[in-house]
Structure formats: structure tokens, C-alpha cells
Image: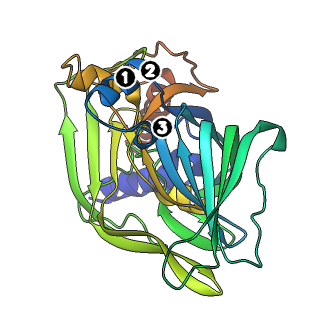
């Protein structure tokens, strides 16, 4: 009995002195991830042939809070998101870039306020001002900028011990970038905190299907995560309140690589976006939707999809092939624990 107790204490001690970085996926302390919602001309042509209008066909729609003004960005070219991760033991520092090609940026403002440009002026193709026809807002104006390219950049942190997104003292919720296999997202656990509180409503493990995105094949297992629903309205608070967007029912949906924990696809806003000032987001990968809707291949992931993933441990290009075996780093980690415990047992004998 005494020997068993000593062994248990030894194991707990070993686990307690392990590097804190192991509370996150092994790759998260030094990695870069790129996601895309790709423009695909054949899909645009298909949508037009179905009676849709050109302005309805976007790869992303974002509502961005810049200095208290809400800007609506509608992207007609490709949407690309880049996340660069560097860990310091207690936090993972994230530098993010959102790159929008062929984008319209609009703002609805009272007469004494002009839009502030957060874009490169050399990328502006055209600009127009339209009078308002909304009752009570007749003196307000719509400002619409057509840009060749727009980059929104920002930084935030992710706490290592619970994977929570933090910026300027505000905790937004669990990062969308990973589902740590050592501390996985489970049904009923809290997910987002600010500005919307949600929990995990559904978790499904898929051990059978091989999914695809453009140039990438994703082997099982994968994990689908769905949050509880939430509602919101986005109001422009300038002189008077003007409702920009009302969403009575929304839920966050993510698909992860269940072995490594990497985010594979999502459709909408998440704590990471809120920390960057993106209050609302929706994504459409046109290449994937073309394969699903026109070619009939239902195993393409759509929304915002993984395009590239690199870490200091392993690297990959666009032809990533996900496999089942654990990485060498993970194997060495667990092997070292087994050796230490074994040595203690022999010593106690």
C-alpha cells in the first residue's frame, strides 16, 4: 500500500514539473497557420447562371470596429488569414493578418464625421458617397471604398493553461485555432465569454471519412464542434444609434484534426476575431462549394479552410497529407514519462 502511494505521488510530481507548454498542442508554441476562402471563377459563373447577382457572391463579409466606427467589408476576390504563433511558456502570442482581395469597404456616418482610412491609399480603386434614405437619418451618408486589397492586422494572446484568447485584460473565450488533444473540447464546457457567452452543444468524432480542401487531403479522425446558439445586433453608436446587423440566431461551428488538434475549417466569427475587432464574420470557399454543388463531391470542407501549416517541429506545403501516427515529439514525451516512472518503481522495490 505504501509503495503504491509513493508511486502515485511520484507520477503526480513528474506531471507537475513538466513544461507548461505541454498544456497546449505540441506544435502551438512555434507555428504558422494560413486559412483561405478562395475566389473561384467557375463557381461565380455557376451562381450567376442560377440567377444570383454579382454583388451577392462574396468570399467573406466582415464587420470591423475601427476607432468606434463600424466598417462593412465585402470581399469578391480571395480572403486569406495568416496566424503566426510564438509561445513564452505562459502565453502564446499571436500575430494575425487578414488579407482581402477586391473588396468593398463601407461605413454609414453622420454629417460631422468622416471615415478614417485604415488601408493603403495606393490600393483604392474608387470611392463614392451616397445619401441616406433611412427615416430619421436623412443627413447621414454611406461612404463606399473599392479597394484592390485590404489588410487588417492585429495581435492577441492565448493563455497556455486554458487556451483562452486574451487582449488588453479582456478574456474573449477559447481560441478557434486548436482543440488540444490533451485537454479536448467536450460537451457542456464553456467556449466564448465576451461579448457572447456560449457553451459546447455538440461534439462529433468522424473516424471514417476523408475530407478535402484544395490541394489538401485530410485523413480521419476529425472532430466537429458546435456551440450553443447566441444572438446579437451590431449598432453604430454615433450621435444616434443605427442598426448595422441583427442576427437573432447564430452558432459557431468548427472542424478540427482530432489527432493534432489543428483547426481545419470554420464559417463565422470566433473569440480570435473578436480580439482583433472583427465583430461579425462569414466565409465561403468558392472552390470547395463548386466541388460540392456542381461536381457532387460532398467531402470538401468549405467556409474558411486550412491552406498551409508549418511548425518548428514539422513543416508542410499545400499538399499536406494528414496521417494517424503520433509525431516523434509526442512519442518521446510519453516515453520519457514511462522511463521515469519505471525507474522509480525499480528503485522502490
Q: Marks 2 and 1: in contact by CB < 8 Å? A: yes
In the rendered structure, which disc, 3 or 1, sits on the residue that comes first in sequence? 1
Using the image, tell me which numbered label, if any, was put on residue 41: 2
Which residue has dot 1 on it?
45
Q: Where is residue 112 in the image (x, y as percent from the top left)?
A: 77, 79
Using the image, tell me which numbered label, if any, was put on residue 77: none
For the C terminus, give its image quadrant: top left
Question: Measuring 64% from the left and 79% from the top, which residue is drawn there?
Answer: 139
Element type at marker 2?
helix
In the displayed structure, would residue 7 be above or below residue 198?
Answer: above
Between marks 1 and 2, how big is the CA–CA gap?
6 Å
Element type at marker 1?
helix
Mark nearer the viewer, 3 or 1: 1
Left or right for 319, reference 138: left
Which residue has dot 3 on it?
340
Q: Which of 347 and 25 is in front in this view?
A: 25
Residue 47, picture quadrant: top left
For the N terminus, give its image quadrant: bottom left
Mark nearer the viewer, 1 or 2: 1
Question: Measuring 54% from the left and 27% from the top, which residue is drawn there?
Answer: 309
Residue 290, picture quadrant: top left
Q: Nearer the viewer, residue 111 or 79?
A: 111
Amino acid at each position: 500500500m505504501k509503495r503504491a502511494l509513493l508511486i502515485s505521488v511520484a507520477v503526480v510530481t513528474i506531471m507537475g514539473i513538466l513544461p507548461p507548454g505541454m498544456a497546449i498542442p505540441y506544435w502551438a508554441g512555434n507555428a504558422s497557420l494560413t486559412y483561405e476562402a478562395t475566389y473561384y471563377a467557375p463557381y461565380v459563373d455557376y451562381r450567376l447562371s442560377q440567377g444570383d447577382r454579382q454583388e451577392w457572391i462574396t468570399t467573406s463579409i466582415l464587420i470591423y470596429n475601427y476607432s468606434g466606427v463600424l466598417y462593412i467589408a465585402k470581399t469578391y476576390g480571395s480572403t486569406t488569414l495568416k496566424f503566426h504563433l510564438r509561445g513564452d511558456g505562459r502565453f502564446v502570442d499571436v500575430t494575425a493578418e487578414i488579407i482581402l482581395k477586391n473588396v468593398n469597404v463601407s461605413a454609414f456616418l453622420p454629417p460631422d464625421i468622416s471615415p478614417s482610412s485604415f488601408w493603403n491609399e495606393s490600393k483604392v480603386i474608387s470611392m463614392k458617397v451616397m445619401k441616406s434614405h433611412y427615416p430619421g437619418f436623412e443627413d447621414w451618408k454611406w461612404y463606399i471604398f473599392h479597394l484592390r486589397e485590404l489588410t487588417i492586422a492585429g495581435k492577441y494572446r492565448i493563455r497556455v493553461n486554458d487556451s483562452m484568447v486574451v487582449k488588453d485584460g479582456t478574456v474573449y473565450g477559447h481560441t478557434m485555432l486548436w482543440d488540444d488533444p490533451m485537454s479536448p473540447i467536450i460537451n457542456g464546457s464553456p467556449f466564448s465569454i465576451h461579448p457572447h457567452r456560449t457553451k459546447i452543444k455538440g461534439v462529433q468524432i468522424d473516424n471514417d471519412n476523408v475530407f478535402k480542401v484544395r490541394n489538401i487531403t485530410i485523413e480521419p479522425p476529425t472532430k466537429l464542434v458546435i456551440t450553443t446558439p447566441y444572438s446579437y445586433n451590431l449598432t453604430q453608436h454615433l450621435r444616434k444609434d443605427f442598426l448595422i446587423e441583427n442576427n437573432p440566431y447564430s452558432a459557431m461551428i468548427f472542424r478540427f484534426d482530432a489527432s493534432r488538434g489543428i483547426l481545419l475549417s470554420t464559417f463565422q466569427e470566433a473569440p480570435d476575431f473578436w480580439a482583433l475587432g472583427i465583430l461579425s464574420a462569414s466565409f465561403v470557399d468558392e472552390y470547395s462549394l463548386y466541388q460540392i454543388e456542381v461536381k457532387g463531391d460532398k467531402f470538401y470542407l468549405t467556409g474558411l479552410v486550412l491552406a498551409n501549416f508549418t511548425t518548428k517541429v514539422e513543416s508542410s506545403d499545400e499538399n499536406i497529407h494528414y496521417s494517424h501516427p503520433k509525431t516523434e515529439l509526442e512519442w518521446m514525451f510519453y516515453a520519457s514519462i514511462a522511463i521515469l516512472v519505471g525507474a522509480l518503481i525499480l528503485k522502490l522495490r
